Image (cartoon, coloured by chain):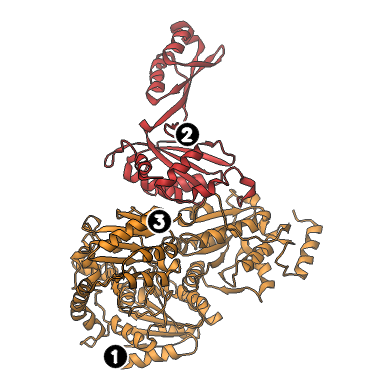
Amino acid sequence: METAQDTIQQNEIKSSPIQGVGGFKGTGSQMLLNGLIEEGVHTIFGYPGGAIMPIYDALYDYADKLTHILVRHEQGGIHAAQGFARTSGKVGVCFATSGPGATNLVTGLADAQIDSTPLVCITGQVFAHLLGTDAFQETDVINITTPVTKWNYQITDAKEIPEVLAKAFYIAKSGRPGPVLIDITKNAQLQIEEFPEYVKCNHIRSYRPKPKVRVEYIEQAAVLINEAKKPFVLFGQGVILGSAEAEFKAFIEKSGIPAAWTIMGEGAIPTDHPLNVGMLGMHGNYGPNVLTNECDVLIAIGMRFDDRVTGRLDKYAKQAKVIHLDIDPAEIDKNVKAEVGVWGDCKETLPLLTNLVNENKHEDWLAKFRDYNQQEIDQVITPELYPDGDEMTMGEVLRNINEICDGDAIIVTDVGQHQMVACRYAKFNNTRSNVTSGGLGTMGFGLPAAIGAKYGAPNKTVIAIIGDGGFQMTPQELGTIMQFGAAVKILILNNRFLGMVRQWQQLFHEKRYSFVNITSPDFVALAKAYYIEGQMVNERANLRTALETMINHEGSYLLEVMVGRENNVFPMVPQGCSVSEIRLK
Amino acid sequence: MNTEDTIKYQPAKADYEGKQEYNIIVYAENRIGLLNRIAIIFSKRKINIESLNTSPSEIEGIHRFNIVITESYEVVRKLARQIEKQVEVLKVYFNTNDEIIWQELALYKVPTEEITEKVTVERLLRQYGASAVVIRKDYTVFAVTGHREETDALVKALEPYELIEFVRSARVAIIKDSASFHDKLKEFEAFEPGDELVENEFLEKGDKIFTM
């Protein structure tokens, strides 16, 4: 029960709202916001509600220090926080209320968990004395989110706030990053305390963010690499998360080893780099997939051998000796047995390895990649990028974007055919430029993630490439763009089908097109309703101008491009097949 | 540590293909929700936990879980690493039954009248290594510690005498070749590189480090 004394105190605190960064007396909510500022947070994506009202009340006074973006759905909020984290390299922060607000975060948490995205999510919770009573908007958020968070914690006493918040940021961004959720009961948000000075966390006794680097494993790896005739590097997002792009580049340039990327690793080295041989996996490039089963030493760096990368495991790189560099010990030997497992942060391990490897040029071996690439160019890439027919292809849209932006834009994708085409053909000069839902494959990710990506990299052109299906999963975030003005370029590639599922139904289900025929609203009119300009293009003659208009437009813009209905993404490693059984058509 | 030590910690009689009983020992912070976090690592993979014991360890604030499952070496190894990855878990060991000494405690409640008339208490005590915990006019409670077969045998023996209630504890186990938790940590350092050696210094100083 709140006493008159408390009310007076609270009013006093409100009248001098923003406290110093040292110790201060105030509410748990103010402590939380001060802590966020201490952690360097300036942008929060969120949505208020009953159980998080005290935090929002405190936020009212922090407008000059914290920017709050009011999303239109909590899923949009967390995807935006993900996009922010991916382009900025910082921890993304989002707020949601209890009950439905918190459950709406689950998809984003799962996405961030599987793609190792650092997030701190704050959810409100009912008063502590109501826990377990099925109170209004009460859900067991901690247990619902346990499988999809790196760590979570429920605060019922405001005294815990500084310590738990510090711990949350430390856990989210250290080691293999991941999402952390803090659930704060309403009483703790309101509770008035004398808080000590905020201290950042740098150690938890039970937590080893990164394993200690063992020189002997690096030596063993170097021996294998120096003896190899056909070494092959596979790299993933670990290189980007570890900010080890320069170290990685130095390693491949000295050793002369061709390198291929998973979609999460794309952009860690520029697309044009002579040793960048392309994309791995189901819709990856021809050479990297086939030659995985020909190389003699396979060096996997910061990647986890997802089934979309390996295809059939028992026929995957069986001839090769595998060296696996990863920060997460649980990844080594999980899917593919490593001859040498190099545990550690690749920012530390790669320079050590670079020192020990011989300078080399694998010209004959690289020529093999080029041969396969030429076959792919002739049979797949040229027809996709320069089609003969009247129908536009997704690939030619990407080619035009590359010609206009020259690899400097941030490309955010949704999930499906357009995602594979964008990852295959988009040109990247810079790291942290490809934002996509890799592990979870979350349709509806694209639009909200692009909003966050723009806040994470405000000086970049951010293009959200989205299919007609995925766009209809989170179109409400147009409202967020309308209100806060994130200059996101929305490019809808409309084939009037749920294209990827349709492709599978065509190839593996005798063209039984079961519920993939999706109709769409007038997307341009929808954007107009949100005061966002746009146009639709259905003829090649207008494509280039329309893309230029979109990219040069000040503010957000929506461009809908009508592409061929039944185009397929190739090459393709059919499910259950080995990577060397990749099909060009 | 040299490679011989490394080899030593490959499980001696590990069956790499087939399934057998494994004892997973987890040292973890005593924290609400951690049991669930560990349990879902098993349930996510549709693996049944056959026995689970959790109790305070010799180090203050750190709990020890004993988990028994029947799985292959490969699966158990992956599970152990997934458990150890959890923020609040300090260390995970896994061993086959012949690498550990284990016990379960069983309690048996039988009508005193029945057993005094039809079977001698003395014989039961001697034959099954049982001890009488409580003897009342209406019932007697016996306790037996031992392996599953031993505690099962007394259930069989008591069934004709109107066994009222029976309960068995989870398994507790001690690893045969471990000197102590601290030493084991140091030895494991050679096989599974980590920061335990450094962090070990903090184990006895719970309040001086960042913890909750």
Dot in front, 2 or 1? 2
Q: Note whether residue B42 is visible.
A: no
Given residues A491 and B56, the one toward you in this image is: B56
Q: Sequence-wise, which precedes: disc 1 or disc 3?
A: 3
Question: Where is mark 1, residue-wise?
Answer: A540
Chain on which label 3 sits = A
Dot in front, 1 or 3? 3
Residue at (54%, 37%) from the top-left corner? B57
- The local crowd at label 3, few if under 14, some if 14 to 19, many if 20 or more residues have their Cα within 10 Å, is few
Q: Is residue A56 left or right of residue A224?
A: right
Provide the secondary structure element on which disc 2 rests. loop
Residue A28: give x, y in percent of width and height.
Answer: 68, 60
Question: Where is mark 2, residue-wise?
Answer: B179
Provide the secondary structure element on which disc 1 rests. helix
Give the letter of the orange chain. Answer: A
Residue A301, picture quadrant: bottom left
Residue A77: give x, y in percent of width and height.
Answer: 51, 69
Residue at (33%, 62%) from the top-left corner? A300
Chain on which label 1 sits = A
Give the letter of the red chain. Answer: B
What distance separates the C-alpha of mark 3 from that of mark 2?
28 Å
Residue A38: give x, y in percent of width and height.
Answer: 64, 67
